[in-house]
Image: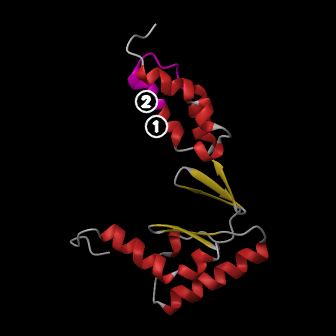
Amino acid sequence: MYFGLCNSPGIFKWIMNSIFKELLHEEVLENYMDYFVILAKTKKELEKGTIWFLKMTKKHNICFKRSKCNFDTKEIPILGVVVIWGEVLMENNKTKTVKKWKTPINIKEVESFLEFANFYRCFIKNFSHIVKPLNKLKCKKDWK
């Protein structure tokens, strides 16, 4: 990637999305910048998706550093989550962090906790209802 170019991360993402649009549309591939995860529920689906992905990379002359590639793995930690056979889960250490979070004693600490927890809202059923009392606390001027 050319670093002198303005908006180069966005351009890189656009190029990757245009090259791999079929795989993305078929939900075989997830892409975040230079992270590529081939999604599959079975080993056969994984093999088929990997072959399709590698054919596309060869067609567009895209190279990868072998030491940064993981093939045929059951779980992949990526960007704060873990992908296991097509299922996306929270990382265990992040769950522990939330459980051990000390009780907020001021508005700043409530906001800090909510910002951290908001990233995992898709994993928590009724998240908005659970955090509603905390959001109300942010509006209070007097803390008791």
| Amino acid type, label 1 | Glu
State the separation of the CA atoms marked 2 and 1.
Answer: 6 Å
Q: Visible in this render: residue 75?
A: yes
Q: Visible in this render: residue 64?
A: no
| Amino acid type, label 2 | Glu
- The residue at the point 52 percent across, 75 percent down is 66
User: Any mark on residue 72, and which?
Assistant: none
The region drawn magenta spans 101-113
Q: Callout 2: few (<14), some (14-19), or many (20+) C-alpha neighbours within 10 Å?
A: some
User: Which residue is most to the top?
Assistant: 144
Residue that badge 2 annotates: 111
Find out whether residue 112 is within the magenta segment: yes
- The residue at the point 66 percent across, 69 percent down is 39
Residue that badge 1 annotates: 115
Q: Which of 36 and 129 is in front in this view?
A: 129
Q: Residue 81, relative to residue 42: is it above or below? A: above
Residue 143 image position (x, y, % from top left): 43, 11
49 sits left or right of 78 in the view: right
User: Which residue is most to the left?
Assistant: 4
* Way the structure is coloured: secondary structure
- The residue at the point 71 percent across, 62 percent down is 74
Q: Residue 106, relative to residue 56: is it above or below? A: above
User: Which residue is most to the bottom?
Assistant: 59
